[in-house]
């Protein structure tokens, strides 16, 4: 092995090392080598009202209606819905579950908890007192 061969080899080693460093540095940026993340269940980004109990499903009442409008539920599984109406900029002075005979006032700035244990599958509608704003539980 002569000197020029040795020099060439040294250059390859340096280039190889630089390549490794580049991959090592760039990998986190490119998001390679990372195990595919499990897609998280869709959770509504809803502001919790004051005193929303832990484990409750948050429902805000906004200008456009209930947020979220559709909530998944399971038969026989108790569900706490924490309704929060931050202000009076909507007509939902109350929330009504017609099929369950539930009717609750929604004073602005307060959290109102509605406890429900669905007994059958299918949609379960809730609405404002005037039936303008609507939402539903999808019971499976
Ligand atoms: Cu209304």
Image (cartoon, helix red, strand yellow):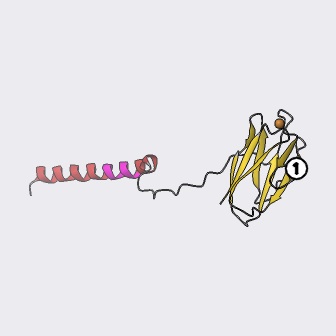
Q: Identify residue for label 1.
A: 103
Question: Whole-percent x and y of residue 16?
Answer: 27, 52
On-image quarter of the C terminus: bottom right
Question: Whole-percent x and y of residue 89?
Answer: 83, 32
Question: Whole-percent x and y of residue 102?
Answer: 86, 53
Q: Nearer the viewer, residue 8 or 98?
A: 98
Q: Is residue 26 left or right of residue 37?
A: left
Question: Whole-percent x and y of residue 75?
Answer: 70, 64
Outermost residue, left side: 2
Q: Secondary structure at mark 1?
A: strand
Q: Nearer the viewer, residue 41 or 97?
A: 97
Which residue is at 61% across, 51% downward?
Answer: 42
Residue 19 is one of the magenta-drawn residues: yes
On-image quarter of the N terminus: bottom left
Q: Which residues are magenta?
A: 18-24
Q: Give the image quadrant in which the ligand numbered 1 is located.
A: top right
Is residue 49 among what the camera can see?
Answer: no
Which residue is at 75% across, 64% downward?
Answer: 119
How packed is label 1: few (under 14 Cα within 10 Å), some, or many (20 or more)? some
Mainly helix, strand or loop, the magenta region?
A: helix
Kindly indicate the quadrant of the structure image that contains residue 68.
top right
Which residue is at 54% across, 54% downward?
Answer: 39
Q: Nearer the viewer, residue 45 or 81?
A: 81
Q: Nearer the viewer, residue 17 or 54?
A: 54
């Amino acid at each position: 092995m002569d000197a020029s061969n040795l020099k060439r080899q040294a250059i390859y080693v340096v280039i190889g090392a630089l390549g490794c460093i580049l991959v090592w540095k760039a990998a986190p940026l490119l998001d390679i080598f990372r195990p595919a993340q499990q897609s998280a269940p869709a959770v509504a980004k809803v502001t919790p009202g004051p005193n929303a109990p832990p484990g409750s499903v948050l429902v805000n009442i906004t200008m456009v209606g209930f947020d979220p409008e559709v909530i998944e539920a399971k038969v026989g599984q108790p569900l706490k819905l924490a309704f929060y109406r931050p202000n009076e900029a909507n007509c939902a002075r109350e929330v009504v579950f017609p099929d369950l005979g539930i009717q609750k006032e929604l004073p602005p700035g307060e959290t109102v908890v509605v406890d429900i244990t669905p007994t059958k599958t299918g949609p379960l509608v809730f609405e404002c007192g005037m039936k303008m704003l609507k939402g539903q539980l999808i019971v499976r």
